[in-house]
Image (spheres, rainbow, N blue to C red):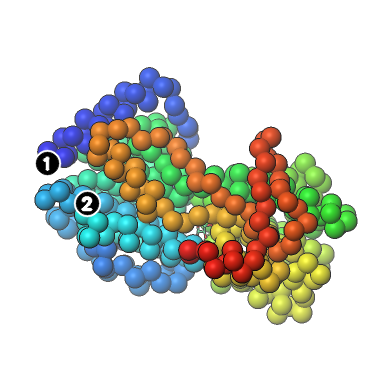
Amino acid sequence: MKKKIISMLLVACMGLSLVACGGGNNKPASNEGSTTEEGSEATQPSDEGGSDESASNEGSDEGGSSDGVITVGFSQVGAESDWRTANSESMKSTFSEENGYKLIFDDAQQKQENQLTAIRNFINQEVDYIVLAPTTETGWDTVLQEAKDAGIPVIIVDRMVDVSDDTLYNCYVGGNFKLEGQKACEWLKAYADAKGIKELNIAHIQGNIGASAQIGRTEGLEEAAEKYGWNIVAQQSGEFTQAKGQEVMESMLKSNDNINVVYCENDNEAFGAIDAIKAAGKTVGPDGDILVMSFDTVKAGIEMTMAGDIICNTECNPLHGPRVEELIKKMEAGEEPEKIAYVDEGIFTYGDEVAKVTVDGQDYDVTKVTQEVIDGRMY
Ligand code: AHR
């Protein structure tokens, strides 16, 4: 309880200092509903946001700090991708009992309604910190106000929330998804120029609509297409999963015979898309019919980049556990963490035609994938 009072004071102080700084981002609210689970040992991430991965344990009364143990309630998006699995593992290994934490891990199975329920359970359990990886950007104002009223600090991780009052969360750490999309598209422009590819007919397989990772990567592509005169011949969500990526690619190939680029918004969609392309009798790669672009650079993704099946793969780093822990340590020490912290991320490619790209006047190096790069990949 003492920690609770300190937390409330910290949140109040942060609110005051943020008002003084005038920081903010705006927007409305949205949808969906529920599932919960507890205990770091209870969760087994499975396939594509399946329902069997949450051993439900709602409303347990075991939250709150005691004995110096810090209780963290983590509402995770789901288990839709290799990236997500690596992210969950990073959080679990960081917030372990040995490290002095009690982690209450909730897998929302890609449903915002489940996250709303999980956060309310965390509040009832009087956790010390709520960590939220949001499915979509909107729809959080009410529940985050409830957390704030309860005096529980909120850390947003991976994707961003879009709330009317940014004092509803304490800080954010994750990827800059718009920048990821811009970097990927600047690479594509330079590569097409280097190879003399005159016309780009792009199939665009999006992530879950409304998630920051989809919004940013889609904006990056749409703005580049407008600027460079590229054709986006098909656009549909692959829900960040391999199965859906394959299904969507199959249907896009049936209705478009001129696709020469597929822009997948994550590696798992790319895996599915490549299967569909090959099954349709077409080829991928630098000398093939279709260039496949992707995001994440998980181990399997970067291996496929070295093989050329994925021609360019822009990093989205999932190892957020230690980053979140650093934020918590700062708050425990009574310090105010940086409000928004973006992770540095690279661009990885099959070839070396493009050494760097420039976005908004800033240069970013491009790395040709080698075995050494693969061996050094942690996820
Ligand atoms: O929010 C990060 C994105 O979500 C990753 O690109 C994707 O693989 C995951 O599902």
Of the pair 41 and 204, the residue shown nearer to us: 41
Look at 67% across and 75% down and name the residue there.
Answer: 276
State the mark number for residue 291.
none
Of the pair 355 and 84, the residue shown nearer to us: 355
Look at 39% across and 31% down and name the residue there.
Answer: 165
Look at 41% across and 22% down and name the residue there.
Answer: 21
**Under tag 1, what secondary structure?**
loop
- Quarter of the image for residue 106 reads bottom left
- Quarter of the image for residue 145 reads top left
Q: Is residue 142 above or below residue 102?
A: above
Residue 279 left/right relative to 193: left
Residue 190 left/right relative to 8: right
Q: Position of residue 55 (x, y in %)?
A: 27, 69
Circles 1 and 2 in contact, beta carbons < 8 Å: no
Q: Earlier in the sequence, mark 1 or mark 2?
A: 1
**Under tag 2, what secondary structure?**
strand
Q: Is residue 176 above or below residue 48?
A: above
Residue 149 left/right relative to 308: left
Q: CA separation, marks 1 and 2?
A: 12 Å
Residue of label 1: 1
Look at 15% across and 48% down and name the residue there.
Answer: 68
Total residue callouts: 2
Residue type beneath disc 1 = Met
Q: Position of residue 268 (x, y in %)?
A: 56, 67
The 10 Å Cα crowd at callout 2, few under 14, some 14 to 19, many 20 or more, is: many
Residue type beneath disc 2 = Thr
Q: Position of residue 333 (x, y in %)?
A: 25, 36
Q: Is residue 259 above or below residue 13?
A: below
The 10 Å Cα crowd at callout 1, few under 14, some 14 to 19, many 20 or more, is: few
